[in-house]
Amino acid sequence: MTEARKFRIATASLAGCFGCHMSFLDIDEKLLDLLQLVDFDRTPLTDIKTIGLRGPCDIGLIEGGVCNAENVHVLREFRAHCKILVAMGACAVNGGLPAQRNHLDLRDILSEVYHTEAGLAHGGIPNDPELPLPLNEVHPIHEVVKVDYFLPGCPPPADAIWKFLTDLIAGRTPRLGHGLLRYD
Amino acid sequence: MLTDILDRHRRDGTRLMQILREAQEALGWLSPATITAIASGIGWPRAKVEGTASFYSFFHTRPMGEYRVLWSDNITDRMLGNLDLMQAMCQKLWLEPGRVSEDGLVSVDTTSCTGMCDQGPAVLVNYRAIPRMTRERVELMVELIRARKPLADWPADWFVIEDNIRRADILLGNRMAPGEALGAALAAGADAMLAEIRTSQLRGRGGAGFATGLKWEACRQARGTAHYVICNADEGEPGTFKDRVLLTRQPDLVFEGMTIAAHIIGARRGYVYLRGEYRYLLESLESVLAARRAAGLLGADILGKGFDFDIEIHLGAGAYVCGEESALIESLEGKRGVPRNRPPYPVTHGFLNQPTVVNNVETFAAAALIAARGGDWYRSFGTPRSAGTKILSVSGDCARPGVYEYPFGVSVRQVLADCGAHDSQAVQISGPSGICIGPDEFDRRIAFEDIPTAGAFMIFDIRRDIFDVVRNFIHFFAHESCGFCTPCRVGTTLLKNLMDKIAAGHGTRYDIDEIYQLNRVLRTAAHCGLGHTAANPLVHTLEKFRPAYERRLKSMEFEPAFDLDAALSEARQMTGRDDAGAHLATDTENAR
């Protein structure tokens, strides 16, 4: 038998603020312990742009909700390559702050910003094919793909992320419990 | 006007439901000013009055038009074409369902089952029941509304509610004169009468089947400043209408049973909680009560025995949850119909926190029979563990829908044969919260030891899609959840969303798993029976009619509940783009 294979983790921030990733980094020196257990695949931490080139991932952590077509593509790629997909933080779980636009009609928003508003009104609504189109509404990620676990918090505390990952890696169903399970 | 109403109710806050109903009947709706005036009239905080006013479907805190037309939306009404008729009505009135017309004349909407399943499709117009709707009636009704004809001038035959008694036994066939059973009970004395009830092995007819003798004895022994008797006529379980027929044909028997219960437990006051959908029964029931008072069967010194007891009728306002006894009591006290924590049970802490017996209409009627004929006689009907008879409300796919009274122990197959049902594929017994059985179980029996029931018996033949039936039930629970506890408030809506997702062709295996998961949450964490049983129709039919679900599933992979490509439509429109990047593949295989 060879030595136990390391877990592969991928992370991405969709319609989020990177606050959850910052909270992840806040596990501080435990990052070194974590690196004994895992390898990082696509993630802003490694700057690897494509997921799964080095084989399938065990865990995908998604920060942020789904607000545009590119988010959908990234999320689908993560789902296709990760055995376990986790909604990390309030925006991924519920849509969060970006979903505040859902009570407005997207067409009104685009008109207001690119037609009516002084200063931006000259260029019209951007229609470069390079730019992903925004969705009519912002969705939590579980409305677009199957999600296995939810890690709430805005952001989830560093200790919660640590507990969650170590539980997953050890084969325990993650249980955050009092103090770590929070919705603000 | 308001002062009259308040004075008539002695400015008593526990009578708030009746004050609100009468104010609304007089003024059309409950305006902020009306609510303020009522609050100061009864000396309650305004928020509490508004809390009650906003809880019940039949109270409105905004104008809903001079004519409010509510289409009963039970599955049996659906099967009789209620939605087509409602749509036709809306088209003729240039109206969207749920909206009030521009001129404030009329609004049209749906409401939960109104208890006319054997003579649907049914509507309530300004809370008056009109069964057997047809296209012709819709057309004429639209004209009457446009001409602002008062309901009193509408065709009288529209308001005729048929009893449709197809099989009568000891209860529905009762021919006793008013006072006969009560006379026997008072002559025997409270102790002996309670013993007879115990001997009879009568069990509650509301569905749970608690031993009536035990309940009455516990209440009699409970200490309090006053004892109360409450008759639960809030017959809200979709598909149930037998109490309506009992109250139409045997009201004396029901009131007599209440009076006997009062004598046993030492109550001086009783209430009938009549569901708002049966508003049309109020006047006739009041006149029966008046006749009983005149005959010395109610009021002071009943039958010259020095026993005082009177009954009052309390009208509900369209809230299914009030059929739960503690929610019913809250409602009777003028509050929102939110179930209480139990224990303590009503027998010790009920109406106004005093010992209270709450029983179903049919239970009281049966108790009156027992008083006249004895417990042993009663026990000779039915099975050893289910004494007496049970009245079934039969509706759906059969030739003779209506009310059938059988001794306990009758088989489902027998009932189906008697009512002329052919090619039946399923029977939903005891309403959406009850059980759904298929043909291989038609030899099962109606009895507490096999299939207990409150009386609903809805039949679906092989033409029906069981999925549609269940979806209707799940929408019902989501609408009727009282909103007090999160598991039920959120859980029933999530179930509804999942059913809509599957219906729209976006369902997957994961959604089926999620249904089971939600059932576990509801069963363990909901505050009352509504939540505990809300997923029953799903769980039963997933077991017995699984293909009805599976053939709707889009794939075994996860699917969103909405069309992702359509979700880019507004941005495409605004940018004028239509390139490949402006679209999303919607099936999972292409997405990879």
Image (cartoon, rainbow, N blue to C red):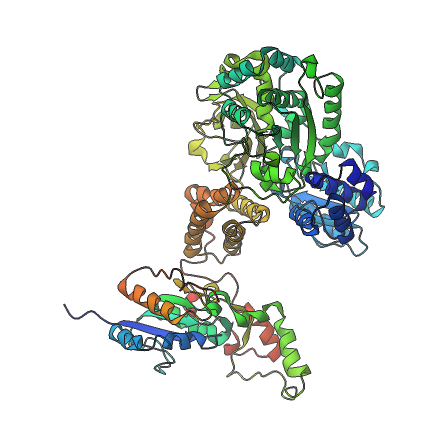
Residue B74 is situated, as x and y percent measured from the top left of the image, at: 60, 41
Left or right? Give the position of B340 relative to B155.
left
Q: Quadrant of residue A44?
A: bottom left
Between residue B574 and residue B351, name the one nearer to us.
B351
Residue B211 is situated, as x and y percent measured from the top left of the image, at: 49, 25
Between residue B99 and residue B296, name the one nearer to us.
B296
Between residue B515 and residue B530, name the one nearer to us.
B530
Q: Which residue is drawn at 39% across and 68% down?
A: A79
Q: How many marks?
A: 0
Residue B414 is situated, as x and y percent measured from the top left of the image, at: 50, 24
Q: Is residue B240 visible?
A: yes
Left or right? Give the position of B430 relative to B300.
left
Residue B448 is situated, as x and y percent measured from the top left of the image, at: 46, 27
**Image quadrant in which the C terminus of chain B is located:** bottom left
**Image quadrant in which the N terminus of chain B is located:** top right
Q: In this view, does A100 lie above or below B41?
A: below
Q: Residue at x 65, y 42 (%)?
A: B318
Left or right? Give the position of B170 relative to A60.
right
Q: In this view, does B289 lie above or below A149?
A: above
Q: Is residue B64 visible?
A: no
